């Protein structure tokens, strides 16, 4: 279990790094193609959605704020240089884009967090169901195997005696 958690955290770190590189790549595209039409801003949705789905609500919201910040840093000076000022409609569209990006991060992240919680609860319920017999409520063979593995590891550490006894009471 510990190696699985470590593997997940390592893959999560690599995913965070890849998403940050994607955000910086979109920012570089915006810098190179400095146009007055902010169509490149919509490329920021992909890393935010991936972050929300894979990493959760908190990381998605932080990434959406980073996207808004980098979009503002790159987009506004380019627009200001070319037109001599920023039109009100563009400011409103940029604000609406930022609000939509943040709300997408919130919704996708929240759905992902709820999904993870539901999967964890179902996994715990399944473990409980697997360890007991449905008919009798007694411990099952799998419970015996888990207990034996636990006792054997205890025996290896402390040299305490181990004994296992199993009865088949339902005769199926």
Image: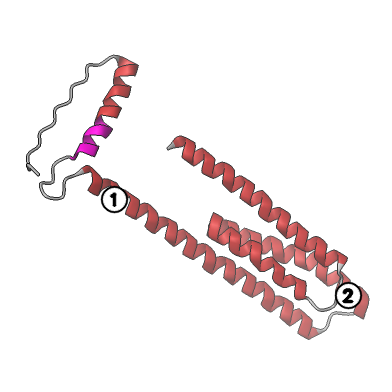
Q: Quadrant of the N terminus?
A: top left
Q: Position of residue 64 (x, y in %)?
A: 65, 64
Q: Quadrant of residue 74?
A: bottom right
**Which residue is identified by label 2?**
80
Q: Earlier in the sequence, mark 2 or mark 1?
A: 2
Numbered range of the magenta stretch: 140-147
Q: Position of residue 61 (x, y in %)?
A: 60, 62
Q: Is residue 48 left or right of residue 83?
A: left
**Residue 52 sits above or below residue 141 on the image:** below
SS of the residue under disc 1: helix
The total number of labels drawn is 2
Q: Residues within 10 Å of mark 2 (few under 14, many from 20)?
A: few
**Residue 157 sits above or below residue 19 on the image:** above
Residue at point 63%, 51% (across, down): 16
Q: Position of residue 66 (x, y in %)?
A: 70, 60
Q: Is residue 3 left or right of residue 140?
A: right
Residue at point 32%, 49% (across, down): 124
**Which residue is identified by label 1?**
126
Q: Nearer the viewer, residue 125 or 164?
A: 164
Q: Residue furthest front?
A: 172
Q: Residues within 10 Å of mark 1 (few under 14, many from 20)?
A: few
Q: Quadrant of residue 102?
A: bottom right
Q: Nearer the viewer, mark 2 or mark 1?
A: 1
- Say if the magenta span includes residue 145: yes
Q: Nearer the viewer, residue 3 or 141?
A: 141
Q: Nearer the viewer, residue 116 or 63?
A: 116
**Residue 100 sits above or below residue 26 on the image:** below
């Amino acid at each position: 279990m510990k190696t699985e958690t470590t593997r997940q955290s390592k893959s999560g770190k690599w995913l965070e790094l890849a998403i940050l590189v994607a955000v910086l790549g979109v920012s570089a595209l915006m810098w190179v193609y400095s146009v007055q039409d902010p169509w490149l801003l919509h490329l920021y949705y992909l890393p935010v959605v991936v972050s929300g789905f894979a990493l959760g609500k908190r990381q998605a919201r932080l990434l959406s704020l980073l996207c808004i910040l980098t979009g503002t840093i790159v987009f506004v000076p380019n627009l200001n240089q070319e037109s001599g000022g920023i039109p009100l409609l563009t400011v409103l569209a940029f604000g609406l884009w930022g609000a939509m990006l943040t709300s997408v991060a919130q919704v996708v992240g929240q759905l992902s967090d709820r999904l993870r919680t539901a999967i964890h609860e179902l996994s715990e319920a399944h473990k409980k169901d697997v360890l007991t017999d449905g008919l009798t409520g007694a411990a099952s063979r799998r419970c015996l195997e888990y207990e034996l593995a636990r006792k054997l590891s205890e025996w290896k550490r402390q040299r305490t005696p181990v004994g296992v006894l199993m009865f088949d009471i339902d005769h199926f």
